[in-house]
Amino acid sequence: MSEIYKVINSEEVCDLDEIKSLMKNRLRIALIKEMRRVSGMGLKDAKDTVETYYSESIGYDDEGLLDAFRGYLEITHVLTKEEFMNIIEDAIDKMDVFHYTNMLDAVTSLCANITKKGGLNKIAEERDKFLRAI
């Protein structure tokens, strides 16, 4: 699954898989151009940002530079159908623990909790933030 995100306050998108490829191939100029496009930075700031995550002996600090890009991107990936169905199945499997007597009540409660926590987008943002932190 490609990591494609929407650029904040723009209709443009950024494919992080493409950024990873540019880093792997050490295409510094292309990375600087992408940073400028995504962030709106000037040439010097974009160059400084990209070069902050580069070492001649090691190459790019992939996660550091990807996080720099992510700072200008909106999380648009919510949950896949499979991830959502796993959550539903887990809620149904645990309905006895939570004292539900039927599946509809368990699913209704799950959906209410999702809404209370800000919806699927917010939950996906929290999940992505957690995964980047570990």
Image (spheres, rainbow, N blue to C red):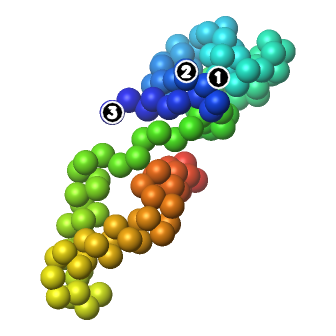
Can you give x and y, in whole percent of width and height, for residue 47 in the image?
77, 17
Quarter holding the C terminus is bottom right
Residue that protrudes farthest toward the bottom in the picture = 99
Image mark for residue 1: 3
In this view, the residue in front, 54 or 9, is 9
Task: Give the structural element (helix, strand or loop) at label 3.
Answer: loop
Task: Give the structural element (helix, strand or loop) at label 2.
Answer: loop
**Dots 1 and 3: beta carbons under 8 Å?**
no
Marked residue nearer the N-terminal end (1 or 3): 3
Image mark for residue 16: none
Mark 1 crowd level (few <14, some 14–19, many ≥20, 10 Å Cα): many
Marked residue nearer the N-terminal end (3 or 2): 3
Q: Which quadrant of the view contains residue 94?
A: bottom left
1 or 3: mark nearer the eye: 1
Q: What residue sits right under mark 1 in the picture?
A: 38
In this view, the residue in front, 20 or 70, is 70
Quarter holding the N terminus is top left
Task: Give the structural element (helix, strand or loop) at label 1.
Answer: helix
- Give amino acid for label 2: Glu
Q: Residue at x 70, y 17 (%)?
A: 36
Marked residue nearer the N-terminal end (2 or 1): 2
Could one spot residue 88 in this view of the protein? yes
Residue that protrudes farthest toward the right in the picture = 44
Q: Which quadrant of the view contains residue 113?
A: bottom left
Is residue 30 found left or right of 51 in the rendered image?
Answer: left
3 or 2: mark nearer the eye: 2
Measured in 3D between alpha carbons, the distance from the residue under mark 1 to the one under mark 3, in whole angstroms, is 21 Å
Q: Residue at x 42, y 41 (%)?
A: 77
Can you give x and y, in whole percent of width and height, for residue 9 in the image?
64, 30
Measured in 3D between alpha carbons, the distance from the residue under mark 2 to the one under mark 1, in whole angstroms, is 8 Å
Q: What residue sits right under mark 2 in the picture?
A: 12
Q: Residue at x 64, y 22 (%)?
A: 38
